[in-house]
Amino acid sequence: MYTDLAEALVKLDRKSEAVVVLQKASELDPFNATLRKTLILQLIQTKDYVNAKTEMEDYVKRFPQDAFMRQMLARAQGAGRSQ
């Protein structure tokens, strides 16, 4: 239900509200990989890079087998060092 609501908010260009909904859903279901990826992508879309990086770090701890997200996290950490 939360994911559907977040998708509807994104379609209405209410991305910040979608992030709040996804954060709540993530608290309720922290081991839902799809939900967590959606939250990370929306944080990036809203240019909330600090929280996106934090969410990526937590995601990789919970789902270490996800090579794509490990690579995204490495890029985010590298970008943070170059600034």
Image: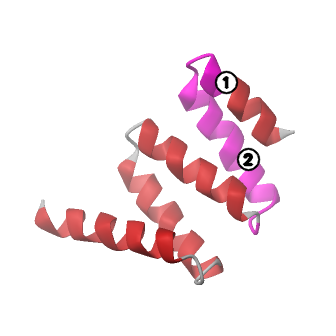
Q: Tag 1: residue type? A: Leu
Can you say whether 24 is above or below 33 in the image?
above
Can you say whether 61 is above or below 28 in the image?
below
Q: Is residue 77 left or right of residue 2?
A: left
Label annotation for residue 9: 1
Residues in magenta?
9-31
Q: Residue furthest front?
A: 68
Quarter of the rendering occupied by the C terminus: bottom left
Label annotation for residue 22: none
Per the image, label 1 sits on a secondary structure element best described as: helix
Residue under numbered circle 2: 24
Task: Find residue 62 and report its image quarter.
Answer: bottom right
Query: How far from the left and from the top, in percent, is residue 36?
Result: 65, 58
Can you say whether 40 is above or below 70 in the image?
above
How would you rate the neighbour count of disc 1 (Cα within 10 Å): few for under 14, some for 14-19, many for 20 or more? some
Q: Tag 2: residue type? A: Lys
Q: Which residue is drawn at 72% across and 24% down?
A: 8
